[in-house]
């Protein structure tokens, strides 16, 4: 919890939450992003460089920096999601969810009985969230957030059924994969007008179904556009890109030196 509210409470009401995206498996980089003011950091175990040990340490570093802790899992790895919840993740994002059945088994892996099948062992999670083990058990099903990634034509076609899965808290759009799927593999164009139209429709349906809509954005303009469509968890700022941009700007600032 930060500012007295859980991440789930912030995502269910109030302004959108911006999350930085952690590719670099260095805990202190994520801690610095938290200290810079990002309200949440997402550790990417699908395309990022993290393995379990590094993700575990990064969860602690994010807590130390005062931000909320989110993980994006590798493909079809609900077991890793459950382990990372035990290590203190507050929100789990599962990539490439294409059917209601996949959404249901993912969502149930995040919740304790009777809503799901999560097994008990949250000692690190309780410590990082400042709760007793008993309070953590009582609060986890409402405080821990499951988001199924919608990033294919198949998922868009199955959206109503995915949104009807009662255990699922929300969806998270991957516009790059979505654009590849919508163009039948012809192009990756996450910021195209066609992709934006589909993203708008997905947000409307998610809000209508009482689910939390989240999305990955490339560019501040996209963040504002997607917030206007109702998205509540918005990625803006990838650690590698932030470092690359700052390094190039620092060198360009110096320019050519005499001699
Ligand atoms: C996508 O855009 O496909 C993503 O998965 C964002 O990380
Ligand atoms: Mg993707």
Image (cartoon, rainbow, N blue to C red):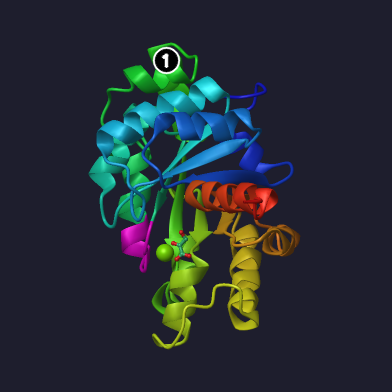
In this view, 67 is above or below 106: above
Residue 45 among those drawn in magenta: no
Q: Residues within 10 Å of mark 1 (few under 14, many from 20)?
A: some
Rendered residue at 28%/25% (across/down)? 120
Q: Answer with left or right where residue 1 lies relative to residue 28.
A: right
Q: Position of residue 48 (x, y in %)?
A: 36, 50
Which residue is the site of mark 1? Answer: 127
Rendered residue at 42%/15% (across/down)? 127
Q: Position of residue 108 (x, y in %)?
A: 34, 45
Q: Is residue 235 visible?
A: no
- Viewer-nearest residue: 32 or 202: 32
Q: Answer with left or right where residue 122 lies relative to residue 40.
A: left
Tell me where the magenta segment starts and ends, as one range: 95-103
The picture quadrant where one finds residue 231 is bottom right
The picture quadrant where one finds residue 110 is top left
In this view, 27 is above or below 216: above
Rendered residue at 62%/35% (across/down)? 39
């Amino acid at each position: 919890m930060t500012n007295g509210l859980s991440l789930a409470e912030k995502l269910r009401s109030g302004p959108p939450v911006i999350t930085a995206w952690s590719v670099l498996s260095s805990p202190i980089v994520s801690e610095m992003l938290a200290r810079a003011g990002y309200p949440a950091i997402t550790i990417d175990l699908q395309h990022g460089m993290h393995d379990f040990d590094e993700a575990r340490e990064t969860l602690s570093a994010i807590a130390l920096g005062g931000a909320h802790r989110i993980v994006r899992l590798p493909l079809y790895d609900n077991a890793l999601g459950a382990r990372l919840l035990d290590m203190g993740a507050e929100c789990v994002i599962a990539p490439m969810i294409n059917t209601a059945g996949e959404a249901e088994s993912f969502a149930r892996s995040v919740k304790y009985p009777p809503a799901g099948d999560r097994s008990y062992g949250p000692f690190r999670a309780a410590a990082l969230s400042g709760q007793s083990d008993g309070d953590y058990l009582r609060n986890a099903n409402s405080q821990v957030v499951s988001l199924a990634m919608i990033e294919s034509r198949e998922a868009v076609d199955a959206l109503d059924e995915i949104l009807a899965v009662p255990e699922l808290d929300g969806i998270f759009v991957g516009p790059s994969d979505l654009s590849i799927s919508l163009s039948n593999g012809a192009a990756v164009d996450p910021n195209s007008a066609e992709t934006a139209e589909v993203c708008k429709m997905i947000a409307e349906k998610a809000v209508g179904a009482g689910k939390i809509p989240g999305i990955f954005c490339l560019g501040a303009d996209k963040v504002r556009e997607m917030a206007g469509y109702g998205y509540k968890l918005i990625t803006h700022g990838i650690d590698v890109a932030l470092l690359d941009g700052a390094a190039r700007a620092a060198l360009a600032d110096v320019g050519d030196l005499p001699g």
